[in-house]
Image (cartoon, rainbow, N blue to C red):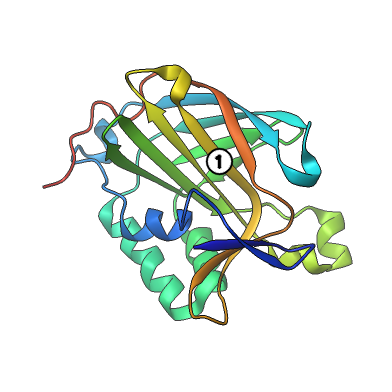
Amino acid sequence: MAYSNGSRCRGRKFGYGSLLLAVLLLAITPAVPADDTKSATIDATAMGTSTQMGKMVSVKVIIDHFSTQEDRQVLVDAFKKGQSQGLVDALSKAKPVGRIAITGTVGTDLTYIGLMRTPTGRRIRFATNRPIRIGEAMNAGPSMAYNLTAGEFDLNDADKNKSTGVLYPAAQLIINKKGELQWELRKNPWKLVNIIDWNKAGSEAQPLK
């Protein structure tokens, strides 16, 4: 799985792999009903990489409940039918399951949050449509194509200092010339550090069997 920087049009390997596809195809959602899932908050610091090195912003993710298997299948089918735009359309129709706020923004609803068990804890992945500002829409520039926001927290229950994460503020999911899924980013991914999992999000849920 590769990603390419939209401003440089270069494809690169990225260690987190096919983030959104894994959300849609591989995430194990909790067995407890959505109404019984406890609300949780995760705070983190997002650090810029590459050309954004040295920049830092705060990120807050509020989880009301995790998405279901049925929610996931709707997004899978939408991407198969309409690729990235199909996914955007399906996310726009989905009910919010949480919210994300980044320093300098008013925040936006999250319409997909998946939960996976890992050998060291839990992996929480999220996706939503990126809010398009009025000025950006009026200019109708190339940034309009990068209309998804996605991210991941890899939470280590044994050692909180080893918890990691990544944020794609502006991205689209494409199929490259090799027929492979590839993230195409408007700029660069942001590394999530100083992660505080206030409520041990998803720890009360049991994996589906």
| Image coords of residue 105 (percent x, y) | 73, 36
| Image coords of residue 113 (percent x, y) | 41, 45
Q: For this rendering, which residue is in front, 100 or 175? A: 175
Image check: 102 left or right of 205?
A: right
What is the three-letter code of the residue carrying label 1? Val
- Dividing the picture into quarters, in which one does residue 104 lie? top right
Q: Residues within 10 Å of mark 1 (few under 14, many from 20)?
A: many
- Dividing the picture into quarters, in which one does residue 158 lie? top left
Whether residue 1 is situated above or below residue 191 in the rendered picture: below
SS state under label 1: strand
The residue sitting at 61% across, 36% down in the picture is 191
All told, the count of numbered labels is 1
Whether residue 58 is situated above or below residue 85 in the rendered picture: above
The residue sitting at 46% across, 58% down in the picture is 18
| Image coords of residue 77 (percent x, y) | 37, 72
Q: For this rendering, which residue is in front, 155 or 150? A: 155
Whether residue 49 is situated above or below residue 2 in the rendered picture: above
The residue sitting at 49% across, 80% down in the picture is 179
Image check: 106 left or right of 125?
A: right
The residue sitting at 78% across, 31% down in the picture is 54
Q: Is residue 193 visible?
A: yes
Residue on which disc 1 sits: 166
Q: Is residue 198 visible?
A: no
Image check: 54 left or right of 119?
A: right
| Image coords of residue 5 (percent x, y) | 71, 60
Taking the view exactly as shown, the residue that stands out farthest to the left is 209
